[in-house]
Amino acid sequence: MLPFIRRQSTQERVERLIREGVGVREAAWEFTPSDTKERDRVANAIVAWVRGMMGEMRKPYGIDHVVLALAARDAGGRVLCTNSMGVVRPASFYEAAGSEGIVAFLGDTDEVGDAKAVRISAALLSLGDLAFELNVAKAA
């Protein structure tokens, strides 16, 4: 029973840390879904932002994985679509797969509504930052 209690305790601590914003970075961009050039510009801006944020993250024991979640909202704030790239290594944002996933998500916004302008919100979660905080709390 003790391992179960430890697991539950760790899960609760991780959830609390995320709610407190540990390891979480957020940003937003506006764009016109039907404009292909604008879509590429925003995709490049998101990739550049992710790369910049990854440079600020802690990487204890080599834990450098991140989770990128994206949401698109119309001018009224209605959610059009969301997506998460799952747990990935930073290298994926230096390869075609990372930017292709973001471009595909931005393309989806054109398919789900007739919005003239869309606000893309991104949340990036650093698992290394969470691991660092868990280790600090454990040592205290």
Image: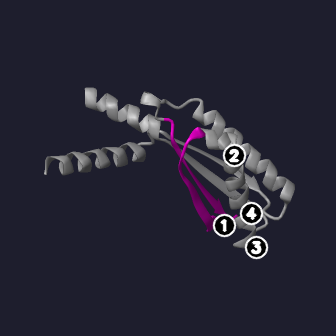
Cα separation, mark 3 vs mark 2, equals 23 Å
Is 67 on the left or on the right of 7, as rendered? right
Residue 66: % across, % down: 52, 43
**CB contact under 8 Å: marks 1 and 4:** no
Residue 106 lies, with reference to residue 136, above or below; the image says: below
In terms of secondary structure, where does tag 4 sit? Answer: helix
Residue 87 forms part of the magenta stretch: yes
Per the model, the C-alpha gap separating discs 2 and 4 is: 14 Å
Q: How is the image coloured?
A: one colour
Q: Which residues are magenta?
A: 64-90
**Label 4 sits on residue:** 107
Of callouts 1 and 4, which one flags the residue occurring earlier in the amino acid sequence? 1
- What residue sits 33% from the left and 31% below the top? 135
128 displayed left or right of 82: left
Query: Mark 2 — residue?
Result: 46
Question: Which residue is located at x 66 percent, y 67 percent?
Answer: 76
Few, some or many C-alpha atoms within 10 Å of disc 1 (few <14, some 14-19, many ≥20)?
few
* Residue type at numbered disc 3: Asp
Which residue is identified by label 1?
Answer: 76
Judged from the image, the secondary structure of the residue bearing numbered disc 1 is loop
Q: Indicate whether 106 appears above or below 21.
A: below
Q: Sequence-wise, which precedes: disc 1 or disc 3?
A: 1
Q: Earlier in the sequence, mark 2 or mark 4?
A: 2
Mark 3 vs mark 2: in front: 2
Distance from label 1 to label 3 (Cα)?
12 Å
The residue beneath circle 3 is 114
Q: CA distance from mark 1 to mark 4?
A: 20 Å
Choose the circle earlier in sequence order: 3 or 2. Answer: 2
| Circle number at residue 66 | none
Under circle 2, the secondary element is helix
Q: Earlier in the sequence, mark 2 or mark 1?
A: 2
